[in-house]
Image: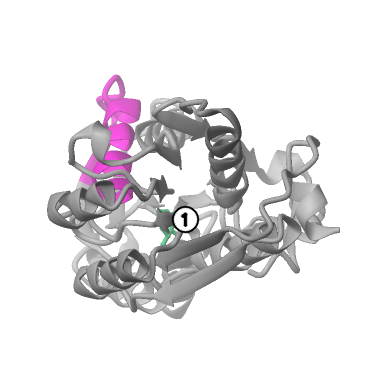
């Protein structure tokens, strides 16, 4: 079923009896909701007792939840860190309690000995792939890009911005004219895109929108339509995640490209813990997931079918 479709093919280790805390950011995006469902399924498959805490986008709630997990004496802690800084103290507490910590999908600025491993994509690469797609797509034509950034201070917002800038660096014809946060949400993506359109001659001066996730792109698509323009044609749309809704938009010609981020970060995390507990095997410090580009040439309707139901 679902989990089998996402796992590597290797049999999942039985971790019955293990109690693992998961401090999740919230449910700001379709991708995030899918990660939550997949994590619960991956835990169930292994017999893990997963303690789930939703931080509603607030780091202070995450820190509280982690302190709660430490007090309970859980066997391990998974953290999807909302922002990159401010983790040293609580991670030191976990280390002193000898509880292994695994970071999921976002990185942090902290000494590497404070966590066992980090399962995430190469977010700079994701941005670069999106930027290089645009360079090819516009083929030398002048192109003004507006950028919808993710949550301020989060590693994907920082890295996807940097990667995209690297991706377009060789193209003097491409310029980022406006860039603002849309907080990884559909509603903020729409709101910020409306402002971009207003300040760009009703959108006539915009050639493309680069959104740090698909949800913001979906919001931007709505704003472009409301402004009487055709997303995907008048304004190109490129984003990151590969959630089902972006494939619907690509199939309809309203979005152009997305870079896939797997929602299965927990599977590799649990496998790393299983090996660590079985024989002390230290995992690699960074377990990097794939970043594949999808466009209209990749059977978007089929890609939609393959993903729907994965908790999105
Ligand atoms: O950290 C991963 C990012 O967080 C996803 O790309 C985005 O959709 C989510 O909110």
Relative to residue 23, is residue 242 drawn left or right?
A: right
| Image location (x, y in percent) of residue 136 | 49, 27
**The residue tagged with tag 1: helix, strand or loop?**
loop
Span shown in magenta:
155-176
Quadrant containing ligand 1: bottom left
Quadrant of res 310: bottom right
Please name the residue that numbered disc 1 is placed on: 75
Residue at image point 38% right, 57% down: 80
- In the displayed structure image, the side of residue 195 where residue 23 appears, left or right: right
Count every numbered label the image shows and give the total: 1
Q: Position of residue 153 (x, y in %)?
A: 18, 55
Identify the residue shown where x is 31% and y is 57%. Answer: 81
The residue closer to the viewer here, 227 or 35, is: 35
Residue 169 colored in magenta in the image: yes
Taking the view exactly as shown, the residue that stands out farthest to the top is 170
Position of 147 with respect to 261 (left or right) is left
Which one is in front, 166 or 146? 166
Quadrant containing the N terminus in the rendered view: bottom right
Q: Is residue 12 visible?
A: yes
Residue for point 40% across, 73% down: 26
Looking at the magenta stretch, what is its main secondary structure?
A: helix
- Percent x, y for residue 223? 41, 75
- Where residue 166 sits: x, y (%)? 28, 27
For the C terminus, which image quadrant?
A: bottom right
Picture layout, residue 257 above or below residue 59: above
Query: Is 72 located above or below residue 140 in the figure?
Result: below
The residue lying at 73 percent from left, 49 percent from top is 14
């Amino acid at each position: 079923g679902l989990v089998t479709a996402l796992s590597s093919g290797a049999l999942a280790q039985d971790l019955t009896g293990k109690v693992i805390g998961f401090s999740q950011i919230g449910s700001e995006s379709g991708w995030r909701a899918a990660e939550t469902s997949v994590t619960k399924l991956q835990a169930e498959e292994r017999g893990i007792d997963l303690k789930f805490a939703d931080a509603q986008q607030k780091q202070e709630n995450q820190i509280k939840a982690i302190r709660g997990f430490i007090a309970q004496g859980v066997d391990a802690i998974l953290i999807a860190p909302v922002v990159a800084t401010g983790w040293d103290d609580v991670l030191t507490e976990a280390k002193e309690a000898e509880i292994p910590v695994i970071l999921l999908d976002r990185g942090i600025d902290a000494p590497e000995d404070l966590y066992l491993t980090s399962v995430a994509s190469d977010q700079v690469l994701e941005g670069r792939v999106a930027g290089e797609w645009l360079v090819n797509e516009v083929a030398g034509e002048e192109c003004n890009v507006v950028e919808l950034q993710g949550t301020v201070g989060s590693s994907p917002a920082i890295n996807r911005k940097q990667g995209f800038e690297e991706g377009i660096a060789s193209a003097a014809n491409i310029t980022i004219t406006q860039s603002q946060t849309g907080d990884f949400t559909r509603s903020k993506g729409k709101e910020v895109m409306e402002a971009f359109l207003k300040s760009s001659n009703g959108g006539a001066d915009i050639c493309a929108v680069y959104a740090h996730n698909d949800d913001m792109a979906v919001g931007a698509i709505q704003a472009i339509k409301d402004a009487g323009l055709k997303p995907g044609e008048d304004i190109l749309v490129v984003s990151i995640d590969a959630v089902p809704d972006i494939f619907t938009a690509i199939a309809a010609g309203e979005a152009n490209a997305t870079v896939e981020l797997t929602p299965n970060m927990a599977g590799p995390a649990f496998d790393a813990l299983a090996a660590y507990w079985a024989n002390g095997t230290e995992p690699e410090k960074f377990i990097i997931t794939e970043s594949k580009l999808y466009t209209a040439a990749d059977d978007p309707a089929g890609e939609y079918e393959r993903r729907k139901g994965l908790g999105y």
